[in-house]
Amino acid sequence: MKKRSEIQDKYKWSFEDYFKNDDDWNKNFEQFSNEIYVISDFYGKLSEKKQILSCFRLIEKISIKAEALYIYANCLSNLDISNPKYQVYLSKIEQKLTEKNEISSFIEPQLSVLDDKFLDEMLKDKEFSDFTKILRDVKKSKKHTLSEEIEKLLSATGSFSSNFSSIFSNFEDGDLKYNLVKNSKGKDMKMSSSLAMIYLQSPDDTLRENAYKELQQAHGRFNNFLTSNYLGSVRKDAFYAKARKFNSSLESALFYEEVGENVYNNLVKNVEENLHLNQKYFEIKKRIYGLKQFKLSDLFFCPLKLKSKYSYDNAINIVCSALAILGDDYVDYIKFMSEKRMIDVFPTENKASGAYETMATKKTPRVLLNFVGTFNDLSTLAHELGHAMHSVYSNKHQSAVNSGYTIFLAEIASTVNEILLNDYMLKNAKNSDEKIYFINQFLSECYSTIFRQTMFANFEEIIHSKIEKNEDISTEIVNSIYFDLVKKYFGKKVKIFDEVKYEWSRIPHFYNEFYVYKYATGLISAINIVKNLMSGKISVQNYKKFLSSGCTDVPTELLKIVDVNFDTEEPFKTAFEYIEGKLKMLNSLKNKK
């Protein structure tokens, strides 16, 4: 692993457009720390348009500064997680953000007592055009907004209500230990979560199976602790939902995303009606890879390997070629990002793992990678650039308040890029093995993102419902619910290990209620958009209008810009037909070999 000093500057982040240096950050932090107290000057004055507008503008100004402060601290802390300097910066801004939320907690309750006619007048007033999201939320949330005293109290709970997630993260990253696992030659192999992902792709069937079982068993050895922690988080969700007068945690989660329950219910219904496609995929993989039986430990096994290794500069060129359909301005900005050091490219000592994109309002995006030259790295690059371009278009065309698109829309642009890249690689494949590889990559993504995430969402709904109805719940019941879902989703032809009943307890997303279903709807939306673009059903201008819309309307209405209508079952039908077409293509390629 290289030291950061060994990497050329052009492949490392520059943050000069955020803050000139640390002294500049500290100066702005002090300004921000003082400005948040000015919010309280509007207490009791939010009944006149002039005062409301002044309050909104102050909140906007403070929020813009806060985002830049947070992203600078967070990103720099990720470049060397062993260095406490920027961890301290991050802690300082997080504490001030909590304080800011407490100070401003009076705003929504005071606005919620205004009558709808007055709120509608402001929504139509051009002076308030930059703040339509706030007003829409206030009007919609009236019956779920509590008294000022209770709202302030609930805001204060934010400092510890996330502890369940923190406890899990600290356990997973620091305390969890794995036993050695044996390969087919009886050799003991070191084991960790990252090594498990390598072993699960190994041609050694014994190693794959032992690694898969230990991945689950390691968590199973702490089954009671992890169950207690998770159920505590679910009870927290149920408490907040009930306090805000929702019928369930699911209703609460969907409400704040501005998504109707029909979308969630249609997702589960349509996925379960198409489980045969998921199971067909496993059957084809079994034949292609010459397996006697397809097991859960074979999910990530792909004996076909690409000979190509991609340099980062070549990867940028490939991604730009694959995304050329989206127009010169789209591609040119990606090149600009690379040239202007908005992408931190290579893994270095103590750098955070994984990849992400982040962007402060009215600033430029930043992408973190750990690029080593595999096709997965190429795909990750395209994915994170999709996030970046969504933010760029939204920030360019919307106000600070209206630019923040919801999580329901957040995984769409990134996945559109991945699909376009996969199609490009498939069209330029040199032989049938490469074609099989790229089709398998797409179908594996569909398994992981549509079928698996919907199964997770189904699990969440069952557990939350049991807690909310005060039904019996225990470690054994939680394990049994998950195990039964695995059997349902994988079918009878896949060998299921008993250890999979512990798998739920290693999923960090469960500590963010009903988050995972949005991965599934995101990929379903992306498949529809790519198909619509390729067929000419929508224009590139339509797509960019969607990317530029921020949160100016509810998510399902914004998706209609690109002809994706979740008020119907058509998006699901289109997506599953597309997946079935890829399955037939994969099966055909195998039959020709």
Image (spheres, rainbow, N blue to C red):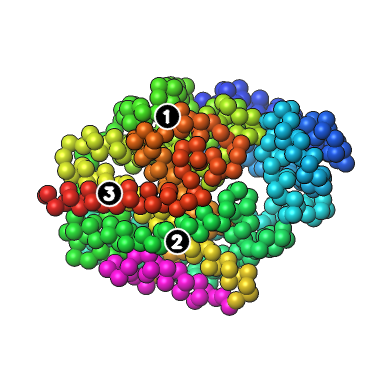
Look at the numbered discs 1 and 2 and tell me whether their residues touch, using CB distance below 8 Å.
no
Helix, strand or loop at mark 2: helix
Taking depth in this image into account, of 575 and 319 the one nearest to the observer is 575
Q: Could you tell me the amino acid type at mark 3?
A: Gly
Residue that numbered label 2 is attached to: 269
Q: Is residue 535 above or below residue 244?
A: above
Q: In the rendered structure, which segment of residues is drawn in magenta?
A: 472-498
Q: Residues within 10 Å of mark 3 (few under 14, many from 20)?
A: few
Q: Say whether residue 476 is magenta.
A: yes
- Image mark for residue 552: none
Quadrant holding the N terminus = top left
- Does the image show residue 270? yes
Name the residue: 16% across, 40% down. Answer: 431
Helix, strand or loop at mark 3: helix
Q: Could you tell me the amino acid type at mark 2?
A: Lys
Residue 262 % position (x, y): 53, 56
- Image mark for residue 540: 1
Look at the numbered discs 3 and 1 and tell me whether their residues touch, using CB distance below 8 Å.
no
Q: Quadrant of residue 491?
A: bottom left
Residue that numbered label 3 is attached to: 581
Residue 185 % position (x, y): 20, 63
Q: Could you tell me the amino acid type at mark 1?
A: Val
Q: Quadrant of residue 283?
A: bottom left
Farthest residue, direction right: 44
Q: Say whether residue 80 is magenta.
A: no
Q: Residues within 10 Å of mark 2 (few under 14, many from 20)?
A: some
Tell me how far mark 3 sits from mark 1, CA to CA.
24 Å
Name the residue: 36% across, 59% down. Answer: 274
Helix, strand or loop at mark 1: helix
Q: Quadrant of residue 539?
A: top left
Mark toward the start of the polypeptide (2 vs 3): 2
